[in-house]
Amino acid sequence: MIKNTELLSMAEAIEYVNKEDSIDIKGFIKKFTKLKPKEAKELKKKLEGLDMMKLRAEQIIKIIDLLPENQEDLNKIVDISLDENETKKILETVKEFK
């Protein structure tokens, strides 16, 4: 039963996996994630704290999942035009968690 809808990164989703299915699902998710759930939550808060009107919640989740390393990667993820200062802030924030 769905109780609410909230966007989660793959790392955060691990916390919501049922114990009976946990081995297969957690193993699958861990193959694609680089952060632990706690780190993903911290990064999410920092990215939201940048107060960028252009950056939507869906894009923040994509950034957390993919951890872009340069401007080109970031532009592919967010699909909006960011100025140089905004790009720099986002990439510096992501770099803290690598």
Image: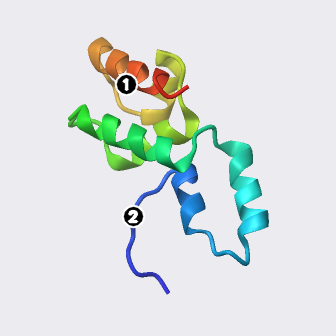
Residue 49 point in image, percent of width and height: 24, 36
Q: Is residue 17 left or right of residue 62?
A: right
Amino acid type, mark 1 = Ile
Which residue appears at 75% of the width and 55% of the height? 28
91 w.r.t. 5: above or below: above
Residue 12 point in image, percent of width and height: 52, 54
28 w.r.t. 79: above or below: below
* Residue holding disc 2: 6
Which residue appears at 42% of the width and 34% of the height? 79
Please state which of residues 52 and 28 is positioned toward the viewer in this rendering. Answer: 28
Number of other residues with Cα within 10 Å of mark 1, as a class: few under 14, some 14 to 19, many 20 or more: many
Residue 90, numbered circle? 1
Residue 15 point in image, percent of width and height: 55, 62
Number of other residues with Cα within 10 Å of mark 2, as a class: few under 14, some 14 to 19, many 20 or more: few
- Reading the chain from its start, which is encountered first: label 2 or label 1? 2
- How many angstroms separate mark 2 from mark 1 (CA)? 22 Å
For residue 48, which quarter of the picture?
Answer: top left
Please state which of residues 83 and 5 is positioned toward the viewer in this rendering. Answer: 5
